[in-house]
Image (tube, rainbow, N blue to C red):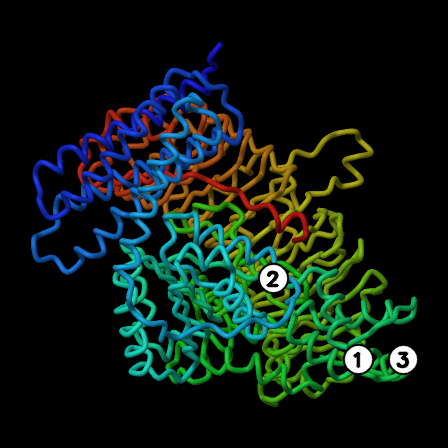
């Protein structure tokens, strides 16, 4: 019996064959210039027709190998159809006629080779096989002679140097690059990006000398090292000579070590050259490119790093002590190829005692301080920022160095940096993200988006995190040490060193303090008179804020890096900070025990809670009465400000100037407190990944100044039918990934300033209210998925309304520690 899969495969191949045959038969009548070659293609297709009939009829059982062959064959015929459609538009004197002639020969050859494979697979009857094989062999020889006639040029072109013998850790990247360059028709330009010393050049050389690549491009490979001070005129001449040789045949163009700042529009020109042609371009650079696709070259694995170190030191023996030392060295080198090679060479033929001494030295200070070669390799990436004399270039440099103020090996939420740079660098939210994108482009940091596909359509920064290679962090710290003023302004220290740096603390603007699980929370001798941003990183279950915080403090960030929520005993101290504008708490268990009943926190503008837990007060537990989450939040807000002494808690009075609230991954959040609706200056309310949130306050419409309402991934939020009519200034409504929402408010049409709605993955939403028509003058964009897009069909007549369909790809590696 013929299976459904066999019928589907056969039908697809049959349709592709018919389209190609009809296109060739039609064009051979209409044109003279390609007629001989078109006739040859048609002859080959005639050989193929009986095979197609057998495939369509399912006279052969499909196995995985045949299925792949049929898929490849179908793609070849579809490409052939597109080629012939192009030929119909080629003029008599078109300079690309030789190029298209060669393409027709290549098409004929590929079909002949496919017939050979099908014959070997036993698709044809054996009595017909001999005649068919002879005919196909004859055509292949004829096509080979045509190719030789078309390629009489010499071999004087730029060639890639041979890569080092048996490079370590590049086999997987090589396979992945070959897959993209040889088999992905959507890739015309591919940029390999990584910091200096990551073996990008070696990888490019391996690609050039790989036999599969040589065969694919018939040895037509151009290799040029561009560098930071390129000879663009010489490069242009070499390229032109090479292109004259290729005669529009398939070729690989390799540009190594490209610095966009000094290369003008080189990448743009190569991108356009590769687009729609038989050329492909491979680029290596320290910087991501906006042209084509980017491939991030990852650091070595532990095993690869150990192998490289052993090779670099020329060790021919092993021992337990030596293995331990090697593991420590790899750790200090951060699995960075150049660092491992340099360190390994420095230990060549050294005694085991010298190894031990070096390991002790590197455990005390950065490895960059001793090995200037590493600094010399990494420094140019940073010099590009220094050479930019504009104010913007100076800010990017400062932002890069600021990252070193945070603990190493951590994932930094973008929201944390937004808060920090808002006060230190006077950057708004969008400009902060632009700076992160620029650092990412220069490979000075890595911007990770946990929900792929959304970053270009929806600025949800709660899904963006930043990581930084440890050696780049050491480079930033080296810059701080070289700049005495910079060290005075930034400090990243352990508590025991705070008293040692007492003089510098007087000038510190950014202070980051990191503690381990043994810290006792004793801050009595610490006074920070000028710190504007204070970042506290800790791992203990119980913690306390410093008693003598700066009266100029504008941003307070408290980060628990432990595995479970931690308690902070004296949050009430925040009420004494008269300049505090932003508070961010991460993984904090918030209790309402020690309330401050005296002061309001009038200056606070933004509060962010990330993975926080609202702890149950002991008095309530004793009465076996559950305190609702909305009461907990109300108590918390007043806990850091001014709670009333009576039972009526209204934090809109305690925090009168609050502009933004962010609550992320707080799983015990079930409801929002009703008196939140009294925050008359609130412009942004963001609640994401709070999966137990089931409803909104009835009076949410009273937030008359609210501009952004984001309720992303609140999976139990059953309805948002509560009246939103009062939100006259609402610009953006986000209910994406709220799987349980069944309907939108009927009066949504009264949101007179609404410009954007994000409603993808709202699976239970069946229809939209007719009042949507009242938004036709303001609503400009709807972000949805394929299913929710259908709900907008009745409103397709709304002018200038763009429907953006997003296909999501979630990236959870950051949660898994990768």
Tally of numbered discs: 3
Alpha carbons under labels 3 and 1: distance apart? 19 Å
Is residue 76 visible from the viewing direction of this image? yes
Are there few (<14), some (14-19), or many (20+) residues within 10 Å of tag 2?
A: some
Looking at the rendered image, the disc whose residue lies closer to the viewer, 2 or 1, is: 2
2 or 1: tag closer to the N-terminus = 2
- Image coords of residue 376 (percent x, y): 58, 85
Q: Nearer the viewer, residue 174 or 196?
A: 174
- Say whether marks 2 and 1 touch (CB < 8 Å): no
- Image coords of residue 729 (percent x, y): 32, 46
Quarter residue 332 falls in: bottom right
- Whether residue 565 is situated above or below residue 299 in the rendered picture: above
Picture disc at residue 170: 2
Q: Which residue is mark 1?
A: 364
Q: Nearer the viewer, residue 530 or 427?
A: 427
- For residue 78, side relative to residue 181 (left or right): left
Quarter residue 777 falls in: top left
Alpha carbons under labels 2 and 3: distance apart? 30 Å
3 or 1: tag closer to the N-terminus = 3
- Image coords of residue 32 (percent x, y): 8, 45
Looking at the rendered image, the disc whose residue lies closer to the viewer, 3 or 1, is: 3
Q: Which residue is mark 3?
A: 352
Are there few (<14), some (14-19), or many (20+) residues within 10 Å of tag 3?
A: few
Residue at point 33%, 72% (across, down): 154
Residue furthest top as drawn: 1
Is residue 507 visible from the viewing direction of this image? no
- For residue 600, side relative to residue 369 (left or right): left
- Whether residue 406 is situated above or below residue 674 in the rendered picture: below
Alpha carbons under labels 2 and 1: distance apart? 32 Å
């Amino acid at each position: 019996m013929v299976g459904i899969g066999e019928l589907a495969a056969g039908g697809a191949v049959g349709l592709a064959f018919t389209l190609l045959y009809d296109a060739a038969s039609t064009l051979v009548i209409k044109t003279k210039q390609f007629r001989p070659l078109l006739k040859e293609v048609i002859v080959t297709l005639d050989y193929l027709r009986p095979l197609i009939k057998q495939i369509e009829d399912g006279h052969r059982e499909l196995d995985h190998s045949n299925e792949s062959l049929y898929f490849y064959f179908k793609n070849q015929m579809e490409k052939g159809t597109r080629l012939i459609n192009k030929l119909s538009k080629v003029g008599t004197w078109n300079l690309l006629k030789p190029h298209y002639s060669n393409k027709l020969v290549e098409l004929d050859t590929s079909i002949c080779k496919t017939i050979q494979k099908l014959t070997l697979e036993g698709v044809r009857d054996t009595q017909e096989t001999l005649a068919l094989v002879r005919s196909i062999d004859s055509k292949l020889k004829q096509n080979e002679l045509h190719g030789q006639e078309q390629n009489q040029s010499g071999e004087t072109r730029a060639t890639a140097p041979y890569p080092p013998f048996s490079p370590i850790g590049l086999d997987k990247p090589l396979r992945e690059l070959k897959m993209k360059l040889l088999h992905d028709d959507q890739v015309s330009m591919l940029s390999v990006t990584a910091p200096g010393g990551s073996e990008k050049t070696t990888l490019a050389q391996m690609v050039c000398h790989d036999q599969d690549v040589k065969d694919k491009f018939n040895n037509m490979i151009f290799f040029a090292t561009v560098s930071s001070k390129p000879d663009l005129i010489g490069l242009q001449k070499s390229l032109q000579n090479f292109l004259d040789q290729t005669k529009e045949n398939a070729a690989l163009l390799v540009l190594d070590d490209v610095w966009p700042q000094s290369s003008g529009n080189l990448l743009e020109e190569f991108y356009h050259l590769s687009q729609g042609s038989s050329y492909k371009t491979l680029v290596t650079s320290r910087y991501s490119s906006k042209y084509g696709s980017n491939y991030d070259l990852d650091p070595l694995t532990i095993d690869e790093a150990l192998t490289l170190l052993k090779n670099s030191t020329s060790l021919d023996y092993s021992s337990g002590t030596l293995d331990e030392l090697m593991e420590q060295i790899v750790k200090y080198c951060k699995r960075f190829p150049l660092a491992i090679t340099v360190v390994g060479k420095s230990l060549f033929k050294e005694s085991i005692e010298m190894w031990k001494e070096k390991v002790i030295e590197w455990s005390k200070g950065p490895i960059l301080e001793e090995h200037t070669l590493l600094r010399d390799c990494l420094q140019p990436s940073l010099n590009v920022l220094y050479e930019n004399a504009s104010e913007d270039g100076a800010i990017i440099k400062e932002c890069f160095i600021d990252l070193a103020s945070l603990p190493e090996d951590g994932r930094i939420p973008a929201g944390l940096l937004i808060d920090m740079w808002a006060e230190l660098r006077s950057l708004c939210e969008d400009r902060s993200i632009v700076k992160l994108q620029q650092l990412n482009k220069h490979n000075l940091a890595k911007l990770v988006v946990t929900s792929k596909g959304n970053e270009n359509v929806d600025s949800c920064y709660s899904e963006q995190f930043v990581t930084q290679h440890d050696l780049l962090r050491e480079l930033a710290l080296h810059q701080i040490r070289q700049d005495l003023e910079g060290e005075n302004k930034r400090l990243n220290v352990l508590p025991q060193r705070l008293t040692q740096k007492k003089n510098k603390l007087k000038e510190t603007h950014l202070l980051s303090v990191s503690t381990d699980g043994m810290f006792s929370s004793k801050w009595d001798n610490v006074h920070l008179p000028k710190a504007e941003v204070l970042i506290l990183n800790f791992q203990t279950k119980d913690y306390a804020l410093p008693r003598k915080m700066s009266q100029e403090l504008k941003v307070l960030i408290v980060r628990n890096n432990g595995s479970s929520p931690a308690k902070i005993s004296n949050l009430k101290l925040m009420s004494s900070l008269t300049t505090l504008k932003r508070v961010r708490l991460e993984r904090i268990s918030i209790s309402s025990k020690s309330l401050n009943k005296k002061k309001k926190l009038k200056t606070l503008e933004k509060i962010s809670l990330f993975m926080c837990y609202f702890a149950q007060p002991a008095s309530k537990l004793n009465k076996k009465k559950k305190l609702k989450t909305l009461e907990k939040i109300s108590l918390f807000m007043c806990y850091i400000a001014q709670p009333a002494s009576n039972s009526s808690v209204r934090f809109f009075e305690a925090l009168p100037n609050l502009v933004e609230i962010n609550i992320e991954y707080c799983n015990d959040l079930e409801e929002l407190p009703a008196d939140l609706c009294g925050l008359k200056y609130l412009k942004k309310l963001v609640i994401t990944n709070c999966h137990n949130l089931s409803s909104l306050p009835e009076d949410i419409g009273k937030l008359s100044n609210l501009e952004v309402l984001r309720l992303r991934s609140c999976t139990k939020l059953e309805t948002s039918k509560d009246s939103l009519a009062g939100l006259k200034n609402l610009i953006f409504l986000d209910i994406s990934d709220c799987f349980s929402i069944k309907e939108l408010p009927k009066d949504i049409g009264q949101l007179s300033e609404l410009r954007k709605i994000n409603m993808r993955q709202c699976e239970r939403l069946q229809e939209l209210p007719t009042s949507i028509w009242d938004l036709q003058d303001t609503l400009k964009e709807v972000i949805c998925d394929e299913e929710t897009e259908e709900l907008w069909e009745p409103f397709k007549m709304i002018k200038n309304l763009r429907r953006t369909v997003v296909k999501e790809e979630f990236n959870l590696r950051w949660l898994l520690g990768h």
